[in-house]
Amino acid sequence: MPDVATSVRSQETASGMSIDLAWRYTIGDPQIRIVVTDSGIKWDEDDIIEKAYLSAGELVNHKPLHADGSACGGDAELAGFDCNGDGVLSVSDYAETPGLMPDASDGHPKGDKNNNGKLDAGDLILNFSDGVDDDKNGYTDDISGWDFMKNDNDPYDDTRYGHGTGEANDSVAAANNGMGSAGVCPQC
């Protein structure tokens, strides 16, 4: 068998990203936001369901609550949003919120308004879009991004190919969960 190091011609090599070397220093930081400007994101995919950005400014009047109706914790921008105590505003912070509709049913968690069997960013958009631009950025109810192609607040990846979803997975897919492969920055 030939030596791989000597059998690869120089014109066939690429520098690569050396993610394994970068991970020696960090696997990311939840405060780092990665923007995918593409065909949208299928935010109901298990590997990225908790990675969908949620706008605290747009949800300021729709903060999550604990099941007993008590306020959630959090500091600074996350004050009142961090129900699960992980330091990140994500869909799971809304899991116990009493006001979510519809009620839980067989195979559907509370708040599964898009009826896909999961609580995801799309459900929060459907539950909390109120016609008010709470964060005053010019995009009404941009709870989890904006669809510039359709000019609406639902940037779900509804294309056949799903390129944006692939890019999101490559960027931030969770690691060590037994699903798919890890993104470049799984903690982002």
Image (cartoon, rainbow, N blue to C red):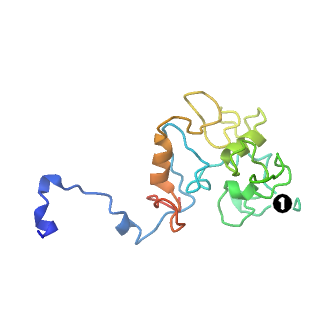
Please name whichever residue, 126 or 77, is drawn nearer the observer in this view of the structure: 126
Q: Position of residue 161 (x, y in %)?
A: 46, 38
Label 1, secondary structure: give it: loop
**Residue 107 quadrant:** bottom right
The residue that appears at 66% across and 38% down in the rendered structure is 142
Amino acid of disc 1: Ala
Q: Is residue 125 above or below residue 64?
A: above
Q: Quadrant of the N terminus?
A: bottom left
Q: Position of residue 24 (x, y in %)?
A: 40, 72
Residue 173: image location, x then y, percent: 51, 57
At a point 50% along the width and 61% down the height, the residue shown is 186
Q: According to the image, label 1 marks what residue? A: 71
Q: Residue furthest front?
A: 106
Q: Nearer the viewer, residue 87 or 118?
A: 118
Tell whether 144 sits left or right of 178. right
| Relative to 161, residue 20 above or below | below
